């Protein structure tokens, strides 16, 4: 067995078999129903109850009874932001993440800023979720096991990366049982806390009133209000997963809008219940921070003191295990939505185009790998410290929240007077969301800036600068290609347009020399490749075969209709080349295919072409830039060189023709 064959076998075992893009059922098989979406996407929000309420509660210091007001404000915020994102799902039924919303409703540049903020946020989502999960798990074990926590977290990043390389549904289904255990154990803990203290509620209300009065006398009404707002703002990590559902609409089962809104309701209701319930439970059990333990772990210890050794230990272990598991599930939001944002930015040329490519499992392999690697590096640099990561967290997501809400308010304002049902309600919901998200963004930035938040802003600013550089490069390349195309079209006029042939049609001569021209559309690169063949070889070739592979990328992998549209576009492009060569007295034909990997697809088509035309030479064009740097090589795929290496092993001649830019 060769090394390549062995590597392919290992890949199939780890990642899975190749999927067929022409199989219409594949979109149904890979899509998620509302319940699975709640697990894979909504878990990001629900898992934040493991650290968001804790940070808010601890920010109150000794004024713990003010937690009631923070909890109620947090629940209201959850429902407001969720309602506003439900409206985004309605307006963007093919996927309305922060990047697309800001791009469409504000400007492409605003969308790029939102996308960059989201990319950093999703890397942090993976890192903080797995690190927090490791904290929850190791809260149960003796202190001397803490030295293994970082290793455990890094292995978690690696395992989730592999799961996601297999595909969306396969990465979600194994996590369903632990997700349900989390929901059941934590819901039980909340209900148990409220039930066992139901007789003390009048006393709790009385103590809250006393605490409010004492705090007001101590720092004044304004000081108390600022204290509540500070705790509310520092608990902003609670809301960070809400955006994931609207961004992940393309992953959902038809009808996508209804499925997305149902998923949003599941997530908002469960998250609000957990946040309010846990903060009340902290208050009722007078939970205090303990070294080496999360606040939830301390709560469960206090709850189970009178249960008996085995029962208490078993419950705490299962609950903390499920907490760790749900946090690992939450990291899925980073792996599911991070590559999707990156691929959308790549399609718009804000990021290298290679990030829009899909693997044979129809996942954004490059995006998944870069998210996993980035999260792993961050985990190592931070040493898995949730306290440090939480400082970096939540600023970026509120940049996206704010831009999305601003875009929606602008949209509804422009649509006023067009008899839109419930227009006032729609702009009111997004307007309230705009005010809330802007307030939280400003508050969190100020409060966290000197604690390390500046690092997040610096990295995000650097990524924005890099995106602007990449966009400028691609724009320059596109303008050059258009000039090349317009030059050819203006020279040959309507020669490329289809028409009815008169007279004798050229006939294929299988024994004659044949030029197989690889094209990626009717464009400047393809046209100049063809004319370079004609210029260099003149009448050497009697037959011309044009090969075009339609690439199924993140932009086309949205349904069978998009794949069919891609195929029609390929046929139209190929026919224009074929018609031109026939007019000039050459036999020509076109071959098209749809795939996610152009190199593999062309290498499979080549033997079929050689069987019909044995005396064939393959030609491909390659752009040549004045300065061939690492940057230009990274931003362009150089697919033709990979194809040449593949053909070399197959014994097939392929000539690369340079196209100077």
Image (tube, rainbow, N blue to C red):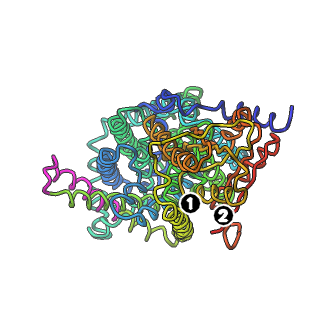
Q: What element carries label 1?
A: helix
Q: Does the magenta stretch include residue 458?
A: no
Quick one: 572 or 357, which is closer to the camera? 572
Could you say where residue 442 lies in the image, as x and y percent from the top left?
38, 68
Q: Assign the C terminus to one quadrant of the image.
A: bottom right
- Give the mark nearest the N terminus, 1 or 2: 1
Is mark 1 in CB contact (under 8 Å) with mark 2? yes
Displayed quadrant of residue 86: top left
Lateral position of residue 213 relative to residue 239, left or right: left
221 horizontally vs 53: left or right: left
- Residue 659 is labelled as 2
The quadrant of the rendering that contains the N terminus is: top right
Q: Residue furthest front?
A: 503
Residue that carries the numbered disc 1 in the rendered image: 524
Q: Which residue: 65% across, 37% down?
A: 508
Characterize the local packing of mark 2: few (<14), some (14-19) or many (20 or more) Cα atoms within 10 angstroms.
some
Q: Give the range drawn in magenta.
A: 417-438
Q: Residues within 10 Å of mark 1 (few under 14, many from 20)?
A: many
Q: Is residue 620 left or right of residue 592?
A: right
**Where residue 538 sits in the image (x, y, percent)?**
70, 56
Note whether 168 is above or below 394 in the view shown. Answer: above
* Residue sitting nearer the eye, 427 or 648: 648
Q: Is the magenta stretch mostly helix, strand or loop?
A: helix
Q: Is mark 2 on a helix, strand or loop?
A: strand
Q: Which mark is residue 170?
A: none
Q: Where is residue 650 in the image (x, y as percent from the top left)?
A: 80, 40
> Residue 321 location in percent, x, y?
58, 35
Can residue 646 be seen here? yes
> Does the rendering let one see residue 75?
no
Where 120 falls versus 284 (above or below)? below
Q: Nearer the viewer, residue 272 or 580?
A: 580
Q: In this view, does 76 lie above or below 231?
A: above
């Amino acid at each position: 067995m060769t090394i390549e064959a062995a590597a392919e076998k290992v890949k199939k075992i780890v990642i899975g078999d190749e999927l067929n893009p022409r199989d219409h059922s594949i979109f149904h098989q890979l899509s998620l129903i509302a319940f699975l979406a709640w697990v894979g996407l909504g878990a990001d929000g629900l898992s934040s109850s493991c650290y968001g309420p804790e940070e808010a509660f601890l920010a109150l210091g000794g004024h713990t009874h003010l937690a009631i007001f923070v909890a109620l404000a947090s629940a209201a915020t959850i429902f407001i932001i969720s309602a506003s994102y439900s409206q985004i799902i309605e307006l963007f039924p093919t996927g309305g993440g922060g990047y697309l919303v800001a791009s469409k409703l504000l400007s492409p540049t605003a969308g790029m800023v939102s996308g960059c903020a989201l990319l950093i946020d999703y890397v942090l989502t993976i890192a903080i979720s797995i690190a927090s999960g490791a904290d929850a798990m190791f809260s149960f074990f003796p202190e001397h096991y803490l030295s293994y926590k970082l290793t455990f977290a890094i292995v978690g990043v690696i395992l989730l990366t592999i799961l996601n390389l297999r595909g969306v549904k396969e990465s979600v289904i194994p996590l369903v049982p632990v997700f349900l255990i989390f929901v059941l154990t934590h819901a039980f803990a909340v209900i148990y806390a409220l039930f066992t203290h139901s007789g003390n509620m009048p006393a709790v209300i009385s103590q809250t009133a006393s605490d409010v009065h004492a705090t007001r006398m101590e720092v004044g009404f304004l000081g108390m209000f600022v204290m509540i707002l500070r705790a509310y703002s520092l608990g902003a990590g609670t809301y960070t997963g809400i955006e994931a559902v609207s961004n992940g609409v393309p992953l959902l089962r038809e009808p996508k809008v209804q499925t997305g809104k149902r998923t949003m309701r599941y997530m908002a209701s469960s998250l609000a219940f957990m946040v309010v319930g846990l903060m009340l439970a902290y208050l009722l059990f007078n939970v205090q921070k303990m070294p080496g333990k999360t606040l939830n772990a301390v709560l469960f210890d206090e709850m189970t003191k009178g249960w008996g050794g085995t029962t208490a230990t078993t419950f705490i272990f299962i609950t903390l295990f499920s907490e760790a598991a749900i946090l690992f599930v939450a990291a899925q939001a980073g792996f599911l939505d991070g590559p999707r944002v990156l691929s959308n930015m790549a399609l718009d040329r804000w990021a290298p185009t290679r990030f829009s490519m899909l693997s044979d499992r129809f996942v954004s392999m490059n995006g998944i790998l870069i998210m996993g690697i980035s999260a792993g590096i961050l985990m190592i640099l931070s040493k898995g410290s949730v306290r440090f990561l939480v400082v970096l967290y939540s600023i970026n997501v509120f940049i996206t929240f704010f831009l999305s809400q601003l875009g929606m308010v602008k949209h509804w304002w422009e649509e006023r007077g067009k008899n839109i049902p419930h227009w006032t309600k729609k702009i009111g919901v997004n307007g309230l969301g705009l005010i809330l998200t802007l307030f939280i963004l400003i508050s969190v930035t100020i409060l966290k800036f000197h604690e390390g938040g500046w690092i997040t802003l610096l990295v995000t600013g650097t990524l924005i600068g890099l995106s602007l550089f990449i966009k400028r490069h691609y724009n320059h390349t596109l303008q050059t290609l258009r000039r090349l195309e317009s030059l050819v079209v203006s020279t040959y006029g309507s020669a490329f347009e289809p028409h009815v042939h008169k007279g004798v049609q050229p006939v294929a001569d299988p024994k004659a020399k044949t030029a197989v021209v690889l094209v990626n559309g009717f464009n400047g690169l393809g046209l100049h490749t063809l004319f370079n063949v004609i210029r260099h070889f003149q009448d050497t070739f009697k037959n011309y075969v044009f090969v075009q592979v339609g690439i199924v990328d993140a932009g086309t992998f949205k349904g069978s209709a998009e794949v069919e549209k891609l195929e029609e576009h390929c046929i139209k492009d190929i026919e224009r080349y074929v018609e031109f060569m026939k007019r000039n007295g050459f036999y020509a034909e076109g071959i098209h295919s749809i795939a996610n990997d152009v190199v593999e697809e062309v290498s499979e088509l080549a033997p079929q072409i050689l069987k019909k035309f044995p005396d064939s030479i393959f030609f491909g064009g390659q752009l040549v830039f004045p300065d061939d740097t690492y940057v230009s090589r990274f931003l362009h795929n150089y697919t033709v060189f990979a194809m040449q290496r593949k053909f070399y092993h197959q014994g097939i001649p392929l000539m690369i023709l340079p196209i100077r830019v």
